[in-house]
Amino acid sequence: MAQQTDLLKMLKQFDQLFSGKIGHYTKRKFHIDLVEDATPFHCKQPYPVPLVDRETVKAELERQVDLGLLERVYESEWGMPMFATKKSDGSIRTVDDLRQLNKVIKRVHYTLPKIRDIFERSKGYRFLTKLDISMQYYCFHLDEQSSWYCVIVTPFGKFRRLVLPMGLANSPDWAQATMEEVLQDVLQDIEIYIDDIAIFSKTWEDHIHLVSKVLRLLQDNGFTVKPEKCEWAVQETNFLGFWFTPDGLKQWHKKIEAIQKLAKPKTLKQLRAFVGVVNFYKLFYHRRAHIMGPLTNLNGLDKYEGQRNFSKYWTQDHDKAFEDTKRMVAKEVLLSYPDPNKPFTIETEASDTQIGAVILQDNKPVAFHSRKLTGAQSRYPIPDKEALAIVEVLTVFRSMLLGAKLHIKTDHMNLTRDDIKSQRLLNWRLLIEEYAPTITYVSGEENVGADFLSRYPLQSSAAEEQENALIPDSRALEESKLSEIMLYYPEEIETFPLRFETLHNSQLQDAAVQQLRDQEGYGMEEFYGFQFVCKTDTEQDPRIVIPEALVNDAIKWYHYVGGHVGSTRLYQTLSTHFYFKGLKQRVEEYVSTCDSCQRNKNPGRGVGELPPRQATELPFEQVAVDSIGPWEITIQGIGVIKFKALTIIDTATLLVEAGRVENSSSAQAALVFENQWLARYPRPLTCIFDQGTEFEGAFLRCLHRNGIQAVPTTVKNPQANGICERMHSTLGDILRTLLREQPPATIVDAYGIIENALASVIFALRSSINRTFGVSPGALVFQRDMFHPIPLMIGYNQIRTERQRIIDDNNRRANLRRRYHDYQPDDQVLILKYNPSKLDERAQGPFRIHSVHTNGTVTIERRPNVLERINIRRIRPYRTNEHLHNNT
């Protein structure tokens, strides 16, 4: 709350910055230089505008004239066509087609930042603020001469552009350079990409100071920002199409979902668009070039031939590569932030047609790189291809790797020798030496880990053989390739721990194992030339005894290689051929304390019993308030309108009110609450609401002014306000029905449907018999039937008793699905993520419990001196065992 107060106090200093107007940068006007032989271009005809959009486009042009962005002209040498596109909200965006002008201007070049560099610089942040400059190009004005080059021709006349136009080749360079000049005093502490600004900080004090300084510079230079597109002091957000978190960089799920929806390309243009959008996230995918090889080969078709005969070249190989690529993209990858104070490990690979590399730190991926080889490079010898992969990853990530301690692993011994004969290899070796890496030869066998199961004769069941027979070879290859691409274990074990030679030597050194040789139920058996102490007194085949020194590594290796398999299957796998007294308990302990499993597997039964809850005694003592939406209504030929509503329910009688809100502000929520409830019903004593931003500021002041106690629910705990949640479901059903019965033709129709839906749901919920009460909520409040003038005598005590019985029964049933656990201060817990996507981890943490409360909540320490109260529904205990999980 103190941080919110600091932020609000700071933002109030910048009214001009949030005015909603278009800014005006006054310190210079921009001049367009033309090449010497440039001749004026004027289109013969304007682009046509659909009849249905003519009035809207005309109004938009007049609006831009009123704002000083355009000026109507009647004669000009230059004239560029213009077209209009619809935005998602149904409004119009005009787009100047400046392609002919771009051909004859002198280009101004200014370097735009790379996402890789921003990623490297943002390590260790805890607070992130994102700013969006409002209509940034329109803040920059053209000089008189240049504006006459930017005349647009429309069906409604000619207009010259007075401000920097979108689509002009120089616009991004001028915008980037100007923003860096304006913010040069803080440039080392922020990231700028044209009209987007990101502010990363490690402490709250530094962050609030830096944000204030940036806002001051923007306001003093005439810029404005869009509040609805800004985010303040968050930990995770989308920036430039990537999802930044304090732990690393991810793909933005919205872009991934868009890629997943793409249909198979039918033209060369569509294929190139698909390859381009996938390559946007090339940092995240190991062996990307290998997977996309058939697609990139086809991408090289002659433009004319590709457009005319594209289907002739598309084969099943391309179908498979397309689907493999979409599945590769669907895998969420977290790239850890690089730490220059820690060593990097680089693993490279080369095939006939592609090279690739992964940069690791603490056995976690920091970056991937792969690309297709050129025709000449594909004919290099294998050692040269491997060296090329090393050289390229060092060059691409030079700013990250130069000066750091590097360990390069290669499976080509030539690169580690001093007597190199090839001039090409010698030149590359000298380039590599600039980084002073340690180059280690790792044999292919050691690099992948010896596969014990491939050399040990195992019996497979008939069912397994039948299942394997049903899997097509192409599918099996596909799964193998994807696993190779995406699977990086949280902790890497260099070699398979149960090699026969390793097992044999370890048994000889373990006195406890040697004492078993002559005991009953044990004996010596030979496997592949090695004698082993084995367990022999069961109906199973002889099982090799695992020495204590190898047990933890064996469990760890099988657990990771098995894709974090559960304890039952892991024990069954190990105990099929190996024996260790107490193995089952050791496996269960290891799996239950595996950090990755606790974070990523579904939580199953809840942990910790829910406390008893008391029913509300009398009507109008307590209300529950919540917001619903936004709902979208599509109007044919106009677009989409959105609306939200505020719902208010008396928790004793379940009497409901609802009102549409114009926006998500706390002032709107307070206004609707006063008009819909306080103006009609007795003042409640308490008000329950969630921790949405609409229930801050003005809403809290409204409660305080009326003497109503605020009872906010814990974060992301919809069960705490379940009455409102159930009402929202009913409203959705009614709204869908009304929209299908009578689709709106105008905006007025749409708002009429909204009001009808709200009125219908209010009446339906007030007049429907409640199973608990035996009467409707309306009858409870008004003490008469909702349809007939029949008075009713209501026994509130009897109803309260019945409600309490149902609450107790529900609580008992809920606790039957939960495991008993007594949370204590200083316990470590994980916080379950609210509504995670399929690929999101299921929990975050661990966090320390600061204090435990009697109402089923605990206060956790999010960060030092930052506390948060949270319901036990959203946590589970975090277990750890340093002895089991440390490398041995």
Image (cartoon, rainbow, N blue to C red):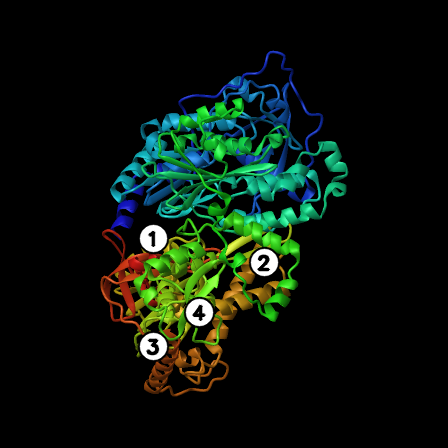
- Residue closest to the eye, 53 or 546: 546
Q: Secondary structure at mark 4?
A: helix
Q: Which residue is mark 3?
A: 619
Q: Which mark is residue 749?
A: 2
Q: Which residue is mark 4?
A: 568
**Residue flagged by tag 2: what amino acid is it?**
Asp
Residue at 48%, 59% (x, y): give it. Answer: 562
Residue at 29%, 67% (x, y): give it. Answer: 857
Gap between marks 2 and 4 measured at Cα: 60 Å
Residue 114 position within the rendered picture, expressed as x and y whole percent measured from the top left: 46, 33
Q: Secondary structure at mark 1?
A: loop
User: Which numbered disc flags the more N-terminal residue, 2 or 1?
Assistant: 2
Gap between marks 2 and 1 measured at Cα: 67 Å
Q: Secondary structure at mark 3?
A: loop
Q: Is residue 659 visible?
A: yes
Q: Is residue 563 visible?
A: no
Q: Secondary structure at mark 2?
A: helix
Q: Which mark is residue 278?
A: none
User: Which numbered disc flags the more N-terminal residue, 3 or 1?
Assistant: 3
Q: Say if mark 3 contacts mark 1, CB within 8 Å.
A: no
Name the front one of labels 4 and 3.
4
**Residue flagged by tag 4: what amino acid is it?**
Thr
Q: Say if mark 4 contacts mark 3, CB within 8 Å.
A: no
Q: Which mark is residue 887?
A: 1
Horizontally, is 238 left or right of 299 in the view? left
Gap between marks 4 and 3 measured at Cα: 53 Å
